[in-house]
Amino acid sequence: MEKKSVCKLCKQTKCLQKSHIIPRSYFKSLKSGHGQLVSIICDEDSIPKISNVDPKESLLCRECEQFISVNYERYGTRLFKSGHGVKRKKSYIELSGFKYTEYYLFLITILWRASVSTLDDFSNVKLGTNIEDLLANCIQNKSIKIKTSLKLDHFIRISVLRVVDSSGNVDDDIIKKMMISFGCERGDSVKNGIMYYFMVDGFLIGYFLSTEKDIHKIRTFKMYAQLNNRPEIKIPKAEIKELKQINDALNSAIIQCQKHP
Ligand SMILES: [Zn+2]
């Protein structure tokens, strides 16, 4: 008989599954084909660490794992893959028929897992119990509404960028195989808040947590490449060289890739 523990999502005592923090289907596509998966862990205090591991932890019961998989991951991990509604332009990717709440909450499930995780790889993501519970509620209810006229995306803004290198120095296949685990940025460049980011499948995902107290400012603030609640959206492309938060991480990844082609 397996040992039972408390599921982080439904809070019931059950047999828990070995959950992936970053969805497993990403790793499947990363590991397929040539070259190796390069996983980079970075934060502002340490130099990037490179690993090939696919970290797992007992976090969720079978039902909750299934719930997240069916309601969020199937959509989120395939969104940019299906030819359906995806148009690749020079400076952006255009999506039609975009399901905002589903995709936004899919990205929230990853941030939430990283926060509730006790693995070293995610030790810099600590949102605190109140925010973790708020996120868990939104995930379970499939809704971003917190209360009348207040929504989760007023407090946590998510940006999505497709990382490219138009100079051709870094092959797009290498960019797609780079996996940058959660990094964290505070201070000058991000006023009054915290930015967490990770990169997978060629996309750089940023979460900006506002600490602004003024409700009007909270609701009207927009950030660059922010996901919009519209059926048609544009995901901008960004040059590797211009993404200063992750440049060090990317540089070490490139060196690592060249050492192990
Ligand atoms: Zn559960």
Image (cartoon, rainbow, N blue to C red):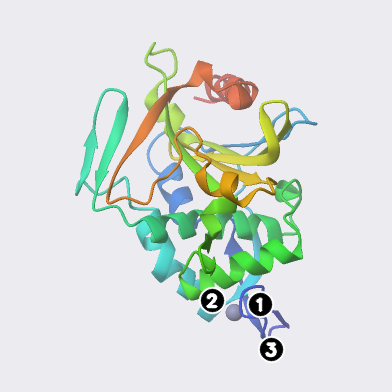
Q: 171 or 2: nearer the eye? A: 171
Q: Which residue is mark 3?
A: 1
**Which amino acid, by three-letter code, is at mark 3?**
Met
List x then y, in percent, for residue 234: 32, 37
**Which amino acid, by three-letter code, is at mark 2?**
Cys
Depicted 227 relative to depicted 250: above or below: below
Q: Residue at x 62, y 60 (%)?
A: 113
Of circles 3 and 1, which is in front?
A: 1
Quarter of the displayed picture in which ligand 1 can be seen:
bottom right
Of callouts 2 and 3, which one flags the residue occurring earlier in the amino acid sequence?
3
| Relative to 120, 195 lies left or right | left
C-beta proximity under 8 Å, tags 2 and 1: yes
The answer for how far apart the CA atoms under marks 3 and 1 are is 17 Å
| Relative to 76, 20 lies left or right | right
**Which amino acid, by three-letter code, is at mark 1?**
Cys
Q: 31 or 231: nearer the eye? A: 231
Of callouts 2 and 1, which one flags the residue occurring earlier in the amino acid sequence?
1
Asked whether mark 3 and ligand 1 are closer than 8 Å, the reply comes as: no
| Relative to 79, 210 lies left or right | right
Q: Secondary structure at mark 3?
A: loop
Q: Which residue is mark 2?
A: 64
Mark 1 burial class by Cα count in 10 Å: few <14, some 14-19, many 20+: many
The answer for how far apart the CA atoms under marks 2 and 1 are is 8 Å
Of circles 2 and 3, which is in front?
A: 2
List x then y, in percent, for residue 81: 29, 46
Depicted 86 relative to depicted 99: above or below: above
Asked whether mark 1 and ligand 1 are closer than 8 Å, the reply comes as: yes
Q: Which residue is mark 1?
A: 7
Q: Quadrant of residue 135?
A: bottom right
